[in-house]
Image (spheres, rainbow, N blue to C red):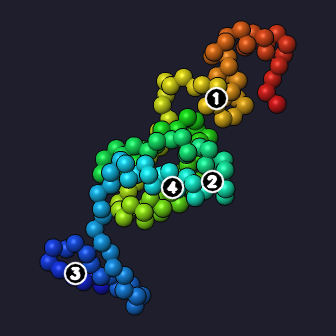
Amino acid sequence: MLTTNLNASNSSSVKIENDKPSITFPDLQVTTDDLQKVWKEYSITIQNEKPHFYNIIVNRVPILSNETEITIELLSQSQESEVLKEKENILIYLRNKLSNNSLQLKTTIPKNKELKITEAITVAEKLKAMTVKNPAFAKLCAEFNLELV
């Protein structure tokens, strides 16, 4: 691979790979507002194609942890699994729209955040949230020998 600088400031370069030149530009600085705007645009692009994934990310607010690291807080392991499956597509979209190829995506799941029933995704998560909210519910399930199906 041959790289030739176009100017002394090293702000852009021409790369020739497999006899095809491509121009690369320096990464632009990303602001929180720009990130959130492009995040919302991305969620709209997948709304019809991937409705389940859309529901996961539409209400998540991405946080710019530093110049290149984007962090999103998720509610469960199942949500994290879905995001990790789509991570490459998300990054391609964000990097392209924000003109920054250094962007990285990180997910977090708060350990001690109480899960609300409306945020619960799986049946098990809903049952756990209901039991935390009303301990008598667990007693009722045990008394009538109710189990998850």
Q: Is residue 113 above or below residue 24?
A: above
Which comes sooner in the sequence, label 3 or label 1? 3
Which part of the image, by quadrant, shows the N terminus?
bottom left
Front one among 138 and 35:
35
Dot 2 falls on a residue whose secondary structure is loop
Q: Picture coordinates of residue 85 (x, y %)?
A: 58, 53
Q: What is the three-letter code of the residue carrying label 2?
A: Gln
Q: What is the three-letter code of the residue carrying label 4?
A: Glu
Residue 5, label in figure: 3
Q: Quadrant of residue 145?
A: top right
Report if the CB atoms under discs 2 and 3 are less than 8 Å apart: no
For label 4, count other residues whose C-alpha is less than 10 Å away and answer few (under 14), some (14-19) or many (20+): some
Which comes sooner in the sequence, label 3 or label 4? 3
Residue 41, label in figure: 4
The Cα atoms of the two marked residues, 2 and 3, are separated by: 41 Å
Report if the CB atoms under discs 2 and 1 are less than 8 Å apart: no
Nearer the camera: disc 2 or disc 3: 2
